[in-house]
Amino acid sequence: MSVRLHLVRHGRAAAGWNVDRDPVLDDLGKEQSVEVAQRLVGLGPLPVYSSPLRRCQETSGPLSALWNTTPTIEPRVAEIPSPVGIALEERVDWLRVAMAGTWTQLGISDGDVYTQYRRDLLDTLAAIPHDAVIFSHFIAINVVIGEALSDDRLVVKSLDNCSVTSVLVHEGTFTIEEMGREADTLIR
C-alpha cells in the first residue's frame, strides 16, 4: 500500500536567513497560506505535520483550522541546519555555496551532520503510515525530490513559496506524483 504525502513549502518569510533564525510570515506569506489551504482543503481532513519553525507553523494554520486539527510538530522536517558556530550574517553565503553542490560534497566537507539530516528526514517521511500534509522547507522538500529522482544535488527544483509537491511512498521508496510550482527563489 502506498501513502501519499503532500509537501508544502512555507509561505514567504518576513526576514531572510541572515537576519532572523526563525522569522514569521510577511503579509504575502499569510495570503499564500490561505490560498494553499483552499487548494488542499478538499483532500481531507488529513493529518498535518509541520516543521517547528514559525514560518511553517503559520503556513499550516489556515488548513489546520479548516480541518479542525492541530499539526504534529516534527523537528526532522525542519530546514537544513547551518554549520555550528557560523555567524547569523554568514549563513546566506554558506547556503548559496551548499546549494550549488551535492549532498555527497556537503557530507565530505562538513561532516556527517548533513548526511544524517537527509537520512532522518527521509526515514521520518517514509514512516508516516497514512496520507498527510507536511509543511516544510525548500531544501527539505528538495531532499525528497532528489531521492525520488536519484539526484544528489541539494537543489533539484526551485520551489516557490506555498508550492505543493505530492509524492507516493511505498516500502521506503519515493515517487513524485506532482511537482510543486517553481519560481526564482531569493536566498536572503
Image (cartoon, rainbow, N blue to C red):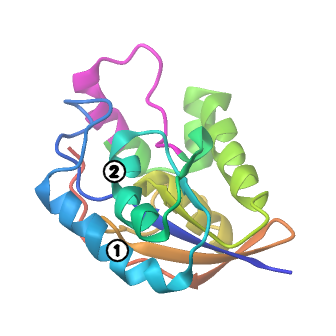
Give the x, y percent position of residue 174: 71, 72
The residue tagged 2 is 58
User: Sequence order check: which comes first, mark 2 or mark 1?
Assistant: 1
Q: Residue furthest left?
A: 27
Residue at (32, 44) in percent of width and height:
96
Could you tell me which residue is drawn at 61 percent across and 42 percent down?
Answer: 76
SS of the residue at dot 1?
helix
- Assign a secondary structure to mark 2: helix
Find the residue positioned furthest to the front.
68
Question: Looking at the picture, does residue 6 appear above or below residue 110?
Answer: below
Q: Which mark is residue 138?
A: none
Extreme residue toward the top, this view: 85
Magenta residue check for 115 = no
Of residues 31 and 173, the one drawn nearer to the viewer in this rendering: 31
Which residue is at the front of the view, 94 or 72?
Answer: 72
Q: Which residue is mark 1?
A: 36
Q: Quadrant of residue 125?
A: bottom right
Range shown magenta? 78-95
Q: Residue 168 vs residue 22: left or right?
A: right
Amino acid on which the number 1 mark rests in the picture: Val
Quadrant placement of the N terminus = bottom right
Query: Residue 36: percent from the left, percent from the top?
Result: 34, 74
Question: Cβ–Cβ below 8 Å for labels 2 and 1?
Answer: no
Alpha carbon of mark 2 to alpha carbon of mark 1: how far?
Answer: 12 Å
Say whether residue 82 is magenta.
yes
